[in-house]
Image (cartoon, rainbow, N blue to C red):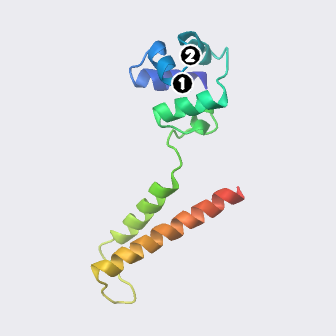
Amino acid sequence: MPNRIKELRKSRNMNQTQLGKLVGVSTSAIGMYEQGRRDPDTSTLLNIARIFDVSMDYLVGACDLPERFDIDSISKSVAKNLMDQPALMFNAECYTDEELSELSLLIENSVRDALSEKLLKD
């Protein structure tokens, strides 16, 4: 975690004082987090994750992907990718734009429900 906070801060051309002000802690606290001499509490970790738009899992080293897991954006992306296929046909029928829009929404909602259900099980 110490390296992640420091890397994120430097990637945003931010000094420890600036990050401390945004997070609501002292400059020395940021320095101690970055040196591994002190661990931030949960609310501070959450603030840091929000400031840098990364997941808390990434900050603490539980995963290597900084992106947050966002069910809404994933479900919209899946639906869009399916609907953007150039030769997409359903039962060899042409559908109106309105019907395709409804289908896209149905796909989006189905993916969102499936992901939500999976997360609740894990």
Amino acid found under the numbered disc labelled 2: Ile
The residue sitting at the right extreme is: 121
The residue sitting at the top extreme is: 28
Q: On screen, 55 above or below 115?
A: above
Residue named by callout 1: 5
Q: Residue at x 52, y 24 (%)?
A: 23
Residue named by callout 2: 30
Q: Residue 37 appears at what percent x and percent y?
A: 67, 14
Q: Residue at x 58, y 34 (%)?
A: 46
The part of the image, by quadrant, that contains residue 93 is bottom left
Residue 21 appears in view: yes
Q: Earlier in the sequence, mark 2 or mark 1?
A: 1
Amino acid found under the numbered disc labelled 1: Ile
For the N terminus, give its image quadrant. top right
The part of the image, by quadrant, that contains residue 85 is bottom left
Q: Residue 59 appears at what percent x and percent y?
A: 58, 32
Q: Which mark is residue 83?
A: none
- Taking depth in this image into account, of 22 and 38 the one nearest to the observer is 22
The nearer-to-camera label among 2 and 1 is 2
Q: Residue 42 appears at what percent x and percent y?
A: 65, 31
Measured Cα–Cα span from mark 2 to mark 1: 9 Å
Local SS, label 2: helix
Q: Residue at x 52, y 44 (%)?
A: 68
The residue sitting at the front extreme is: 24
For the C terminus, give its image quadrant. bottom right
Q: Cβ–Cβ below 8 Å for labels 2 and 1?
A: yes
Q: Residue at x 64, y 23 (%)?
A: 40
Q: On screen, 95 above or below 66?
A: below
